[in-house]
Amino acid sequence: MAARYIFRLDDIAPNMHWDNYLRVRDLFDANGIRPLLGVIPDNQDPELLKFPAAESDFWDMIRGTRQKGWEVAQHGFQHQYVNQEAGLLGIARGSEFAGLPYEEQYEKLQTGRQVLQQHGIETDVFMAPSHSFDENTLRALQELGFSRVTDGFALYPYMYEEPLFVPQILATHWPMPLGVHTCCMHLNGFGEKEYQQLERFVKRYARQAIPFSDAHKYVARRWGNREFGMVIKTALEFIRKIKHALRQTSISRQPESRNEESGNAEPLLEARCSHETISHPS
Ligand SMILES: [Zn+2]
């Protein structure tokens, strides 16, 4: 079976890069793509608050997307990192949840969920800021009835105790020979180059796109699924470190050439949720 692609948009909040969002929305609509929106219930992230506020009712807009089959994940609570914990996945330092006591995590998740509910949005999908969560997060999610998580390293979705994990290895988009892959995008960091790359990919692979709600159909329990995912993760991390080192060398030689708007150009492993991808391309 050819690879399947899920499109995921992170950091959806009243303050964001609306021009980019509307442009990608039109691209997705024109090609029948139904993405997963990572909506921050109560955005207090100072970096994200620098973006312009929505001109119309944000929550009304979110409810409208659901009517055309787009899906919503709860993207943390306030999107504020409180420590340097990388959590179970160990992708990036910085977390809103990992390392905190169970009760504190439960309260954050519950309050976030209530905010969404107050705006008429129910979801059982969790998207952790910076991919950082721990066993206490998973316990709290289970208690609160979340049954799906958009994260993890594997070729196909898998069950880890209770929640269904839908793997998310790729930042943006990258053709793969097989598996179910989540293309993770931070539109706040999109420049023209990133949009063009996305447009080409969408037009070529739209027929292989699936909505997040179909991920459970591809669950694989056979040996090798997660092991192969870890191999991919290790390989991508290695490539990313090399590219990062090369880029740092280039930046130190030509500081004026740095483009602060091209934060999402990295097509490989997703590293940070927002801060680094906005202001410090890595
Ligand atoms: Zn985020």
Image (cartoon, rainbow, N blue to C red):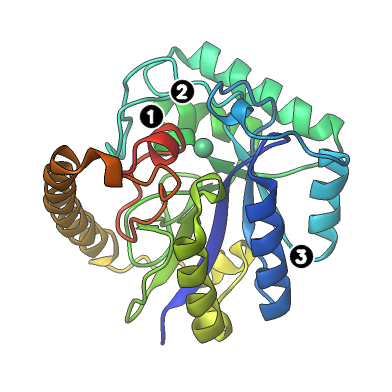
**What residue is drawn where x is 57% and y is 52%?**
9
* Disc number placed over residue 126 in the picture, else none: none
Vertical relation: 180 (above or below) 92: below
The numbered mark, 3 or 1, whose residue comes first in the sequence reads 3
Q: Amino acid at mark 3?
A: Gly
Q: In the rendering, at what x and y percent does residue 268 appear?
A: 30, 59
Between label 3 and label 1, give the one nearer the viewer: 3
Give the CA distance from mark 2 to mark 3: 29 Å
Quarter of the image where one finds residue 278: top left
**Label 3 CA crowd tier, 10 Å (few <14, some 14–19, many 20+):** some
**Label 2 CA crowd tier, 10 Å (few <14, some 14–19, many 20+):** many
* CB contact under 8 Å: marks 1 and 2: yes
- Asked which secondary structure carries label 3, the reply is loop
In the image, 152 versus 80, the foreground residue is 80
The numbered mark, 1 or 2, whose residue comes first in the sequence reads 2
Q: Which residue does the numbered mark 1 point to in the structure image? A: 134
Q: Is mark 3 within 8 Å of ligand 1?
A: no
* Disc number placed over residue 69 in the picture, else none: 3
Q: In the rendering, at what x and y percent does residue 257 appear?
A: 28, 47
**What residue is drawn where x is 50% and y is 85%?**
204
Q: Amino acid at mark 2?
A: Phe
Quarter of the image where one finds residue 98: top left
Give the CA distance from mark 1 to mark 2: 8 Å
Give the CA distance from mark 3 to mark 1: 30 Å
In the image, 250 versus 27, the foreground residue is 250
Q: Which residue does the numbered mark 2 point to in the structure image? A: 97
In the image, 98 versus 238, the foreground residue is 238
The numbered mark, 2 or 3, whose residue comes first in the sequence reads 3
Using the rendered image of the protein, determine whether residue 282 is visible from the camera's viewpoint: no
**What residue is drawn where x is 43% and y is 15%?**
82
